Amino acid sequence: MTEPTGGGEPAAPLPLSGTRAVEVGPGIAGAFAGKWLAALGAEVVKVEPPEGDPARRAGPFPGDAPDAEASGRFLALNAGKESAVLDLATRGGVADLERLIRGADLLLDTLPGAGIEALGPLAARLAALHPALVRVSISPFGRTGPFADLPATPLTLGALSGTLWHVGEPGRPPLAQGGSQPEYLGGLHALGAALAGLLSAAATGRGRSFDLSLQACGAAVMGHYTARASQLGGEGRRLPPRALWRLYRAADGWAGVCGLRRNYEPLAQALGIPEIARSSPFLDRENQQEQERRLAARVAEWFATRSCKEVRELALRRRVPLATVLSIQEVAESEQLASRAFFATDLHPRAGRLLLPARLWRSPAHGWAAGRAPSLGAHTEQALAAAGSRAAASAAPAGPAPGPAAPERGPLAGLRVLDLGQIWAGPYAAMLLADQGAEVIKVESPTNWDPNRCAARPPAGWEAQWWDTCAFFQEYNHNKRALGLDLRHPEGRALLGELVARSDAVIENFRAGVLDRLGVGYAWLRERRPDVILVSMAAFGLTGPERDLPGYGPMIEQTSGLAGVTGYGDGKPQLASYAYGDPVAAVAGAAAVLVALLQRRSTGAGQHIDLAQREVATALLGEAFVDWSLFGRQPAVRGNGHAWMAPHNVYPCAGDDEWVAIAVGSPAEWEGLCAALGRPAWAKRPEYAEARTRWERRQELDARIAEWTRARPKTEVFERCRERGVPAGPVWKMGELLVDPQLASRGFYETVSHPAAGSWRCHGWVWREPGAGPCLRRRAPDFGEGNREILGGELGLSPAELARLEAAGVVAGRPVGVPELDAPAAVRSSG
């Protein structure tokens, strides 16, 4: 049995108790979403083919031989589920699947091709017989568009989503993050979409259908880069990391610093490097590389003489953004995670003691179920019987069945969320809710506004009101309204309180304790609305010895274990330049709001959710912790290589810094690649005939393929592979991503305009409902743009009262302390 060392008190209610889900199809994304649905209390039936889910054959295995009951990947992804074996190649198997789904509230569909649409009339029958069913379809590129049938791997998805371009070092190949991140990120999004659909179905009795594209999930992470490329033109190029946003070699490992302007003076004092305080908050990196190099050299000298322990102790003592790169073992043994009971252990009868992430956030209002991955087919008859009984009990009365909910009215219409967040994690979580129809009001202080407003220099001609048009801010704040309100002032807090009384949830991602110090903590919020939901997203959580540390995305990668499993295999860890810890925490934050809203429907109570960004990122590495549990080892860092697939790499193409990803995993794909290469004589050699021998000779094989790709444009290589069914993808740069044929066919990028600037393109739907129309109902708001509408129109303040509050600085329509544009007015897009 599982020993629940994490996940809350055993008696705590499970928020999805009584919900039933069916998970059908292979892959990590659907399984990862199903895992957390089960942990939240849902009954999740995993439909497996007779030979078992492919994850049962993925390993790692505790012994020398494969064991379908003890595969590390399967154990990590399927805790707490039921297993039903159905042969979907037979009529009986399809009929049984229909029976399961008719007794369920939710369907997670990762079947290849058209998904369950390919199983004859099943989908049409379900729409007629089960109108309240929530469907979440998850596929590499979505079910429509020119790439809908394109085979994919995490490597090629990274190339085609743009994420690959932003990991690795200039002059070296773009790099895949460790741990199949495109699929895990998609799994988090699938969880969020499923919860949005369940909430809508509970309120309306009508189901929702989402068509999730793993490519789009990754491309959405790149949104601030693609929007900036759209504003500035060009494709962008890779540059070395900034001096104050990078890793350095410490005396006994690797550590890093990542800070914004607000952190420069404390960092300068803590490190004894005065130059840090004089650094520009937004360097023109193309023209000031020498300044960056000099500062980086000074910081490197400092790190080189400090141990990782000294770096950690200084960070905690001075509360500055320094962090060390932790191994999987160090994460597993973390005092911070232990204090928050993040891991659960399972004494598995075949695998032994396993350590697994137990939850995505903490809440005193609910627990997390601890469970074990099921044996193959252990629940087939039981699941079918339960589904039949449930379907009969909930059968709709005779007569026309209601149709599905209208997609133009989002599933979260009627909800109001106050977004107190800054930079990325909090605003991105609120944006996901706004995209689905929630009314989101972004509340900013006139003197402590969102730094993303000035995160990048404006294009030439956009200097007027430039704090409202920055791509970084625009991308993650669309579909919101804005209020400029000083919460340090009693009248500002009083106005916020009136809004809280009219709102369902509040999201914030400040450091632990900030809301309480402002006088607007959870207890204060509850006084204004007893059932309010507060989601706090501090980097390391609200409790534990590291609670007071500031934290940014790179620090989350370092302390979660992700940076340590990403690299070229030369011993140096690598970070993503897009601060990956922020968006993954944001998706979980949106899901946390939805879980709390679902639970409030049954209990009438609100709750305070404590979501540590570091813990969400750690949860994406469950397989690595199984590996460590079984063998006590750090997962191998293979660069763009694979444990058994070859070729599997990123190859140079014609042009400057042009690359293509190719991944071959089957005999048919190898044959297709040989055809794409023009069937060269070397490809016919016997040592390349088998997957094992190709893998053993992968370096010479890579050299031969690179010789061929180097002479050709990456788009030509991609098209040759695509025509022959070979997983491949050009490594898109940011400007190229804007014209990707698949994303374009699905209307992923939409045009927005600003009266003080012009037009550009932002990303739209991630949780996409077929037929939903445009995602962007409004561009991101100007600072305080909604002051008069919200405070005057809704709260009833007179024009004279508003003028008095503006004169007192309580309400503002412009941020105070915007940096002067005293350097060149325009920069080119950079990586």
Image: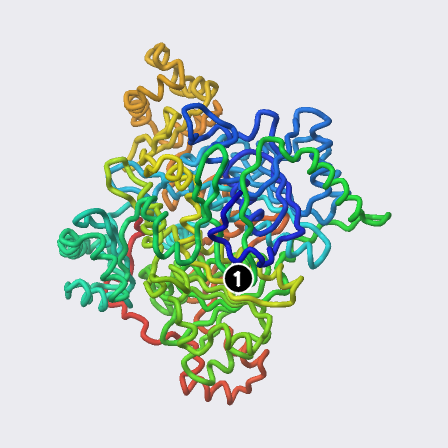
Left of 722 or right of it: where is 459? left
- Kindly identify the residue that appears in the image at 42 percent across and 64 percent down: 509
Q: Amino acid at mark 1?
A: Asn
Q: Is residue 784 above or below residue 494?
A: above
- Residue 242, by quadrant, is bottom left
Q: Nearer the viewer, residue 647 or 557?
A: 557
Image position, residue 535 (x, y; %): 49, 64
Q: Secondary structure at mark 1?
A: loop
Q: Residue at x 39, y 52 (%)?
A: 581
Q: Looking at the image, which is closer to me, 275 or 738?
A: 275
* 123 relative to 826 in the view: left or right: right
Q: Is residue 282 above or below residue 63?
A: below
Q: Count the marks: how many?
A: 1
Q: Is residue 272 visible?
A: yes
Q: Is residue 30 left or right of residue 160?
A: right
**Which residue is more in the foreground, 22 or 680?**
22
Q: Position of residue 136 (x, y in %)?
A: 60, 44
Looking at the picture, tell me which residue is in the foreground, 438 or 181: 181
Q: Residue at x 36, y 76 (%)?
A: 447
Residue 397 at x, y percent in the picture = 84, 49
Question: Which residue in the structure is indicated by mark 1?
Answer: 479
Mark 1 crowd level (few <14, some 14–19, many ≥20, 10 Å Cα): many
Q: Tell me, what colour scheme is on the image? A: rainbow
Q: Position of residue 200 (x, y in %)?
A: 66, 56
User: Is residue 737 in view?
Assistant: no
